[in-house]
Amino acid sequence: MLNETQIILIGNYQPDKIESMDKFAQMLQREFTKLNIKVEIWFPKVFLGRYVRSTSGGFGKWLGYIDKWVFTPFLLKHFVHNKILKNPDVYFHICDHSNAPYLKYLPRERSGITCHDVLAIRGAFGYIDAHCPASSTGKYFQKWILKNLVQAKFLASVSRSTLQQLTELTQQNIEKQIHWKVIHNSFNEDFKIIQKEKVELLLEKTGIDLNKPFVLHVGSGLPRKNRRLLLQMIAVLDKDWTGNICFAGEAIDEQLLTEAKFLNLQERIISVVKPDHDTLGALYNGCEALIFPSFSEGFGWPLIEAQACGAPVIASDIEPLIEISKGSALHANPDNPQQFAKAFLSLKDDTIKFELIEKGVKNTLRFQAVHMINAYLDLFGILKSKLNECAA
Protein backbone atom coordinates (compact mmCIF):
# COMPACT_ATOMS: atom_id res chain seq x y z
CA MET A 1 0.00 0.00 0.00
CA LEU A 2 1.32 3.40 -0.99
CA ASN A 3 0.13 5.02 2.22
CA GLU A 4 2.73 2.92 4.01
CA THR A 5 5.49 4.84 2.25
CA GLN A 6 7.85 6.18 4.87
CA ILE A 7 10.70 8.67 4.68
CA ILE A 8 13.45 8.76 7.27
CA LEU A 9 15.30 12.06 7.37
CA ILE A 10 18.84 11.89 8.73
CA GLY A 11 19.31 15.06 10.75
CA ASN A 12 22.36 16.73 12.25
CA TYR A 13 24.20 16.00 15.47
CA GLN A 14 22.26 18.25 17.81
CA PRO A 15 25.12 19.59 20.00
CA ASP A 16 26.57 21.20 16.86
CA LYS A 17 23.57 23.59 16.86
CA ILE A 18 23.48 24.17 13.12
CA GLU A 19 20.18 26.03 13.12
CA SER A 20 19.71 26.34 9.35
CA MET A 21 20.10 22.59 8.83
CA ASP A 22 17.74 21.80 11.71
CA LYS A 23 15.13 24.09 10.16
CA PHE A 24 15.65 22.45 6.78
CA ALA A 25 15.02 18.97 8.22
CA GLN A 26 11.94 20.22 10.06
CA MET A 27 10.67 21.83 6.86
CA LEU A 28 10.97 18.56 4.94
CA GLN A 29 9.25 16.70 7.74
CA ARG A 30 6.39 19.19 7.83
CA GLU A 31 5.82 19.18 4.07
CA PHE A 32 6.03 15.40 3.62
CA THR A 33 3.59 14.99 6.50
CA LYS A 34 1.08 17.20 4.66
CA LEU A 35 1.02 14.52 1.94
CA ASN A 36 0.16 11.83 4.49
CA ILE A 37 3.62 10.32 4.21
CA LYS A 38 4.98 8.83 7.40
CA VAL A 39 8.16 10.71 8.18
CA GLU A 40 10.57 10.97 11.07
CA ILE A 41 13.90 12.63 11.72
CA TRP A 42 16.68 10.38 12.98
CA PHE A 43 19.49 12.18 14.74
CA PRO A 44 23.05 10.98 15.40
CA LYS A 45 23.24 9.89 19.01
CA VAL A 46 24.85 12.03 21.68
CA PHE A 47 27.15 10.28 24.11
CA LEU A 48 30.39 12.14 24.81
CA GLY A 49 29.03 15.43 23.50
CA ARG A 50 26.77 15.81 26.50
CA TYR A 51 29.78 16.40 28.74
CA VAL A 52 31.00 19.58 27.04
CA ARG A 53 29.47 23.02 26.60
CA SER A 54 30.27 23.22 22.89
CA THR A 55 31.29 20.88 20.08
CA SER A 56 32.28 23.70 17.72
CA GLY A 57 35.96 23.64 18.62
CA GLY A 58 38.74 22.33 20.83
CA PHE A 59 38.30 19.21 22.92
CA GLY A 60 34.52 19.28 22.54
CA LYS A 61 34.82 19.12 18.75
CA TRP A 62 36.82 15.89 18.98
CA LEU A 63 34.33 14.35 21.39
CA GLY A 64 31.62 15.23 18.90
CA TYR A 65 33.61 13.55 16.14
CA ILE A 66 33.79 10.35 18.17
CA ASP A 67 30.01 10.42 18.65
CA LYS A 68 29.35 11.14 14.97
CA TRP A 69 31.91 8.97 13.25
CA VAL A 70 32.64 6.13 15.68
CA PHE A 71 29.47 5.40 17.64
CA THR A 72 26.73 6.64 15.29
CA PRO A 73 27.58 4.45 12.25
CA PHE A 74 26.98 1.25 14.24
CA LEU A 75 23.67 2.56 15.56
CA LEU A 76 22.59 3.84 12.14
CA LYS A 77 23.34 0.52 10.48
CA HIS A 78 21.22 -1.31 13.06
CA PHE A 79 18.41 1.26 12.80
CA VAL A 80 18.28 1.02 8.99
CA HIS A 81 18.24 -2.78 9.05
CA ASN A 82 15.24 -2.83 11.41
CA LYS A 83 13.36 -0.19 9.40
CA ILE A 84 13.71 -2.13 6.16
CA LEU A 85 12.58 -5.34 7.83
CA LYS A 86 9.43 -3.64 9.10
CA ASN A 87 8.67 -1.65 5.94
CA PRO A 88 10.26 -2.35 2.54
CA ASP A 89 8.72 0.88 1.21
CA VAL A 90 11.00 3.14 3.23
CA TYR A 91 13.27 5.88 1.89
CA PHE A 92 16.19 7.60 3.59
CA HIS A 93 17.41 11.13 3.03
CA ILE A 94 20.44 12.85 4.55
CA CYS A 95 19.53 16.50 5.07
CA ASP A 96 23.06 17.91 5.22
CA HIS A 97 25.86 16.96 2.81
CA SER A 98 28.34 17.20 5.69
CA ASN A 99 26.93 13.86 6.82
CA ALA A 100 27.71 12.19 3.47
CA PRO A 101 29.81 9.44 5.15
CA TYR A 102 26.53 8.01 6.50
CA LEU A 103 25.54 7.09 2.93
CA LYS A 104 27.53 3.88 3.14
CA TYR A 105 25.15 2.62 5.85
CA LEU A 106 22.02 3.33 3.80
CA PRO A 107 20.51 1.32 0.91
CA ARG A 108 21.80 3.08 -2.23
CA GLU A 109 18.64 2.56 -4.27
CA ARG A 110 16.44 4.15 -1.60
CA SER A 111 18.64 6.91 -0.23
CA GLY A 112 19.44 10.48 -1.14
CA ILE A 113 21.20 13.55 0.14
CA THR A 114 20.90 17.32 -0.13
CA CYS A 115 24.01 19.28 -1.06
CA HIS A 116 23.64 22.82 0.29
CA ASP A 117 27.03 24.05 -0.86
CA VAL A 118 30.56 22.89 -1.60
CA LEU A 119 32.27 25.93 -0.11
CA ALA A 120 34.19 24.10 2.62
CA ILE A 121 35.07 21.30 0.20
CA ARG A 122 36.38 23.76 -2.39
CA GLY A 123 38.27 25.54 0.37
CA ALA A 124 39.97 22.25 1.24
CA PHE A 125 41.13 21.97 -2.37
CA GLY A 126 42.58 25.47 -2.28
CA TYR A 127 39.92 27.42 -4.17
CA ILE A 128 40.37 30.98 -2.90
CA ASP A 129 37.00 32.14 -4.26
CA ALA A 130 35.23 29.80 -1.81
CA HIS A 131 36.43 32.05 1.03
CA CYS A 132 36.52 28.99 3.31
CA PRO A 133 40.13 28.29 4.23
CA ALA A 134 40.66 24.86 5.78
CA SER A 135 43.02 23.60 8.46
CA SER A 136 45.11 20.50 7.80
CA THR A 137 42.51 18.40 9.62
CA GLY A 138 39.71 20.22 7.82
CA LYS A 139 41.25 19.42 4.44
CA TYR A 140 41.23 15.71 5.24
CA PHE A 141 37.67 15.85 6.58
CA GLN A 142 36.24 17.77 3.62
CA LYS A 143 37.91 15.47 1.09
CA TRP A 144 36.44 12.53 3.00
CA ILE A 145 33.00 14.13 2.74
CA LEU A 146 33.42 14.62 -1.02
CA LYS A 147 34.57 11.02 -1.51
CA ASN A 148 31.34 9.80 0.07
CA LEU A 149 29.10 12.49 -1.41
CA VAL A 150 29.86 11.48 -5.00
CA GLN A 151 28.67 7.94 -4.22
CA ALA A 152 25.09 9.19 -3.83
CA LYS A 153 22.71 7.94 -6.47
CA PHE A 154 20.04 10.51 -5.57
CA LEU A 155 21.37 13.99 -4.92
CA ALA A 156 19.54 17.30 -4.61
CA SER A 157 21.60 20.45 -5.08
CA VAL A 158 20.04 23.67 -3.79
CA SER A 159 21.35 25.72 -6.71
CA ARG A 160 22.59 25.22 -10.24
CA SER A 161 25.97 26.75 -9.43
CA THR A 162 26.46 24.40 -6.47
CA LEU A 163 25.74 21.41 -8.69
CA GLN A 164 28.15 22.71 -11.31
CA GLN A 165 30.89 23.20 -8.72
CA LEU A 166 30.29 19.72 -7.33
CA THR A 167 30.58 18.08 -10.73
CA GLU A 168 33.74 20.06 -11.44
CA LEU A 169 35.26 18.75 -8.22
CA THR A 170 34.34 15.18 -9.08
CA GLN A 171 35.44 15.57 -12.72
CA GLN A 172 32.32 13.70 -13.72
CA ASN A 173 30.00 14.36 -16.63
CA ILE A 174 26.89 16.00 -15.20
CA GLU A 175 24.82 14.50 -18.02
CA LYS A 176 25.55 11.04 -16.66
CA GLN A 177 24.28 11.94 -13.20
CA ILE A 178 20.63 11.44 -14.10
CA HIS A 179 19.57 11.38 -10.46
CA TRP A 180 21.46 14.50 -9.46
CA LYS A 181 18.95 17.36 -9.60
CA VAL A 182 18.75 21.06 -8.79
CA ILE A 183 16.03 21.49 -6.19
CA HIS A 184 15.85 25.02 -4.84
CA ASN A 185 15.18 25.40 -1.15
CA SER A 186 11.81 26.68 -0.08
CA PHE A 187 11.17 28.96 2.87
CA ASN A 188 11.88 27.26 6.18
CA GLU A 189 9.61 29.73 7.98
CA ASP A 190 6.64 31.91 7.04
CA PHE A 191 7.88 35.29 5.82
CA LYS A 192 5.37 37.91 4.71
CA ILE A 193 4.49 41.58 4.63
CA ILE A 194 3.01 42.64 7.97
CA GLN A 195 1.26 45.78 9.20
CA LYS A 196 3.41 48.79 10.01
CA GLU A 197 2.08 48.99 13.58
CA LYS A 198 3.17 45.42 14.31
CA VAL A 199 6.56 46.06 12.75
CA GLU A 200 7.11 49.08 14.97
CA LEU A 201 5.98 47.21 18.07
CA LEU A 202 8.43 44.39 17.43
CA LEU A 203 11.31 46.69 16.52
CA GLU A 204 10.89 48.80 19.64
CA LYS A 205 12.00 45.78 21.64
CA THR A 206 15.30 45.61 19.74
CA GLY A 207 16.37 49.12 20.63
CA ILE A 208 16.24 50.32 17.03
CA ASP A 209 15.61 54.05 16.67
CA LEU A 210 12.37 54.08 14.68
CA ASN A 211 12.94 57.71 13.76
CA LYS A 212 15.89 56.74 11.57
CA PRO A 213 15.87 54.46 8.53
CA PHE A 214 18.19 51.46 8.52
CA VAL A 215 19.72 49.01 6.11
CA LEU A 216 19.91 45.37 7.12
CA HIS A 217 22.43 42.55 6.96
CA VAL A 218 21.36 39.05 8.00
CA GLY A 219 23.89 36.32 8.65
CA SER A 220 26.92 35.29 10.60
CA GLY A 221 30.16 37.13 11.18
CA LEU A 222 32.16 34.83 8.90
CA PRO A 223 34.56 36.76 6.64
CA ARG A 224 32.77 35.47 3.53
CA LYS A 225 29.58 37.23 4.68
CA ASN A 226 31.43 40.53 4.09
CA ARG A 227 29.77 42.56 6.83
CA ARG A 228 32.40 45.28 6.56
CA LEU A 229 31.09 46.28 3.12
CA LEU A 230 28.03 47.83 4.78
CA LEU A 231 30.32 50.10 6.77
CA GLN A 232 32.25 51.00 3.64
CA MET A 233 29.04 51.59 1.70
CA ILE A 234 27.68 53.99 4.33
CA ALA A 235 31.03 55.79 4.43
CA VAL A 236 30.84 56.27 0.66
CA LEU A 237 27.27 57.59 0.92
CA ASP A 238 28.44 60.14 3.47
CA LYS A 239 25.80 62.92 3.71
CA ASP A 240 23.66 61.40 0.94
CA TRP A 241 22.21 58.98 3.51
CA THR A 242 22.40 59.32 7.28
CA GLY A 243 20.54 56.22 8.44
CA ASN A 244 21.76 53.28 10.51
CA ILE A 245 23.07 49.77 9.86
CA CYS A 246 21.52 46.75 11.54
CA PHE A 247 23.44 43.48 11.75
CA ALA A 248 21.11 40.59 12.58
CA GLY A 249 22.59 37.22 13.53
CA GLU A 250 25.87 36.86 15.34
CA ALA A 251 27.04 39.62 17.64
CA ILE A 252 29.37 42.24 16.17
CA ASP A 253 32.99 41.23 16.66
CA GLU A 254 35.83 43.49 17.78
CA GLN A 255 37.32 43.77 14.30
CA LEU A 256 34.07 45.11 12.84
CA LEU A 257 33.59 47.47 15.77
CA THR A 258 37.14 48.77 15.35
CA GLU A 259 36.51 49.52 11.68
CA ALA A 260 33.21 51.22 12.56
CA LYS A 261 35.07 53.47 15.01
CA PHE A 262 37.73 54.23 12.40
CA LEU A 263 34.97 55.35 10.00
CA ASN A 264 33.17 57.19 12.82
CA LEU A 265 30.12 54.99 12.36
CA GLN A 266 30.05 53.31 15.77
CA GLU A 267 26.94 55.26 16.79
CA ARG A 268 25.10 54.17 13.66
CA ILE A 269 25.42 50.41 13.97
CA ILE A 270 22.91 48.16 15.71
CA SER A 271 23.33 44.50 16.57
CA VAL A 272 20.30 42.24 16.95
CA VAL A 273 21.75 38.96 18.15
CA LYS A 274 19.96 35.80 17.02
CA PRO A 275 16.53 37.39 16.50
CA ASP A 276 13.51 35.12 16.81
CA HIS A 277 11.36 34.60 13.75
CA ASP A 278 8.89 37.42 14.46
CA THR A 279 11.68 39.90 15.08
CA LEU A 280 13.53 38.85 11.93
CA GLY A 281 10.35 39.31 9.92
CA ALA A 282 9.91 42.78 11.39
CA LEU A 283 13.51 43.68 10.50
CA TYR A 284 12.93 42.64 6.90
CA ASN A 285 9.66 44.59 6.81
CA GLY A 286 11.14 47.69 8.40
CA CYS A 287 14.48 48.04 6.61
CA GLU A 288 15.22 50.33 3.68
CA ALA A 289 16.92 47.43 1.94
CA LEU A 290 18.64 44.14 2.63
CA ILE A 291 22.32 44.45 1.77
CA PHE A 292 23.68 40.97 1.02
CA PRO A 293 27.31 41.36 -0.11
CA SER A 294 28.58 37.79 0.45
CA PHE A 295 31.73 36.63 -1.29
CA SER A 296 30.35 33.08 -1.53
CA GLU A 297 27.05 31.32 -0.87
CA GLY A 298 25.40 27.98 -1.53
CA PHE A 299 21.86 29.35 -1.83
CA GLY A 300 21.12 32.59 0.04
CA TRP A 301 17.94 32.32 2.12
CA PRO A 302 18.00 35.97 3.34
CA LEU A 303 17.56 37.17 -0.24
CA ILE A 304 14.16 35.55 -0.72
CA GLU A 305 13.13 36.06 2.92
CA ALA A 306 13.58 39.81 2.54
CA GLN A 307 11.72 39.84 -0.77
CA ALA A 308 8.77 37.98 0.78
CA CYS A 309 8.59 40.77 3.37
CA GLY A 310 8.55 43.50 0.74
CA ALA A 311 12.15 44.65 1.12
CA PRO A 312 14.30 45.59 -1.88
CA VAL A 313 17.52 43.59 -2.07
CA ILE A 314 21.01 44.57 -3.14
CA ALA A 315 23.20 41.48 -3.38
CA SER A 316 26.58 40.43 -4.71
CA ASP A 317 26.90 39.84 -8.43
CA ILE A 318 27.94 36.22 -7.88
CA GLU A 319 26.31 32.87 -8.37
CA PRO A 320 24.08 31.51 -6.99
CA LEU A 321 22.65 34.88 -5.88
CA ILE A 322 22.03 35.91 -9.48
CA GLU A 323 20.34 32.56 -10.07
CA ILE A 324 18.16 32.91 -6.98
CA SER A 325 17.14 36.53 -7.66
CA LYS A 326 16.49 35.96 -11.38
CA GLY A 327 16.50 39.69 -12.07
CA SER A 328 14.47 40.68 -9.01
CA ALA A 329 17.36 42.20 -7.04
CA LEU A 330 20.08 44.74 -7.71
CA HIS A 331 23.57 43.24 -7.91
CA ALA A 332 26.98 44.74 -7.32
CA ASN A 333 30.60 43.69 -6.91
CA PRO A 334 31.18 42.60 -3.27
CA ASP A 335 34.64 44.19 -3.45
CA ASN A 336 33.21 47.53 -4.54
CA PRO A 337 31.31 49.58 -1.92
CA GLN A 338 30.88 52.36 -4.48
CA GLN A 339 28.74 50.07 -6.64
CA PHE A 340 26.60 49.09 -3.65
CA ALA A 341 26.22 52.78 -2.70
CA LYS A 342 25.14 53.67 -6.24
CA ALA A 343 22.61 50.82 -6.28
CA PHE A 344 21.24 51.92 -2.91
CA LEU A 345 20.87 55.55 -4.00
CA SER A 346 18.90 54.39 -7.05
CA LEU A 347 16.17 53.29 -4.62
CA LYS A 348 15.42 56.96 -3.95
CA ASP A 349 13.51 56.76 -7.20
CA ASP A 350 10.14 55.38 -6.06
CA THR A 351 9.48 53.85 -9.47
CA ILE A 352 12.68 51.80 -9.30
CA LYS A 353 12.10 50.89 -5.66
CA PHE A 354 8.51 49.70 -5.99
CA GLU A 355 9.21 47.87 -9.23
CA LEU A 356 12.03 46.01 -7.47
CA ILE A 357 9.76 45.16 -4.53
CA GLU A 358 7.07 43.88 -6.87
CA LYS A 359 9.57 41.74 -8.78
CA GLY A 360 10.91 40.41 -5.48
CA VAL A 361 7.52 39.32 -4.18
CA LYS A 362 6.80 37.62 -7.50
CA ASN A 363 10.20 35.90 -7.41
CA THR A 364 9.42 34.27 -4.07
CA LEU A 365 6.61 32.26 -5.67
CA ARG A 366 9.33 30.05 -7.19
CA PHE A 367 10.38 28.99 -3.71
CA GLN A 368 7.08 27.81 -2.29
CA ALA A 369 7.24 24.49 -0.45
CA VAL A 370 4.96 22.69 -2.89
CA HIS A 371 7.50 23.05 -5.70
CA MET A 372 10.36 21.79 -3.56
CA ILE A 373 8.54 18.81 -2.07
CA ASN A 374 7.22 17.67 -5.46
CA ALA A 375 10.76 17.81 -6.81
CA TYR A 376 11.97 15.59 -3.96
CA LEU A 377 9.20 13.10 -4.70
CA ASP A 378 10.32 13.08 -8.32
CA LEU A 379 13.90 12.55 -7.23
CA PHE A 380 12.96 9.36 -5.43
CA GLY A 381 10.46 8.28 -8.08
CA ILE A 382 7.53 8.30 -5.66
CA LEU A 383 4.28 8.63 -7.62
CA LYS A 384 2.76 11.99 -6.74
CA SER A 385 -0.59 11.19 -8.31
CA LYS A 386 -1.15 8.24 -6.01
CA LEU A 387 0.09 10.22 -3.05
CA ASN A 388 -2.47 12.87 -3.83
CA GLU A 389 -5.14 10.16 -3.86
CA CYS A 390 -4.03 9.12 -0.40
CA ALA A 391 -4.12 12.73 0.80
CA ALA A 392 -7.65 13.08 -0.56
Image (tube, rainbow, N blue to C red):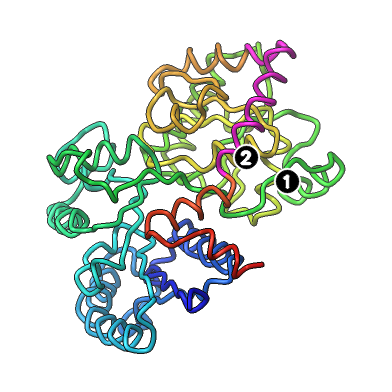
Pick whichever of labels 1 and 2 is earlier in the sequence: 1
Residue in view at x 17 percent, y 51 percent: 135
**Residue 71 percent coordinates (x, y):** 23, 83
**Does the magenta run of residues contain 361?**
yes
Give the quadrant of the C terminus. bottom right
Q: Give the camera-side residue of 267 and 182.
A: 182
Q: Is residue 237 above or below residue 75?
A: above
What's drawn in magenta, residue-wise?
A: 346-367
Name the amino acid, label 1.
Gly
260 relative to 163 in the view: left or right: right
Residue in view at x 47 percent, y 64 percent: 25
Verify CB contact (< 8 Å) between mark 1 and mark 2.
yes
Q: Give the camera-side residue of 174 and 97.
A: 174
**Residue 143 percent coordinates (x, y):** 14, 53
Q: Main secondary structure of the magenta part?
A: helix
Numbered label attached to residue 270: 2
Q: Secondary structure at mark 2?
A: strand
Residue in view at x 56 percent, y 21 percent: 234
Q: Which residue is mark 1?
A: 207
Q: Secondary structure at mark 1?
A: loop
Q: Residues within 10 Å of mark 2 (few under 14, many from 20)?
A: many
354 relative to 86 in the view: left or right: right
Residue extending farthest right = 197
**Does the magenta run of residues contain 32?**
no
**Residue 264 percent coordinates (x, y):** 56, 25
How many marks overall?
Answer: 2
69 relative to 91 in the view: left or right: left
Name the amino acid, label 2.
Ile
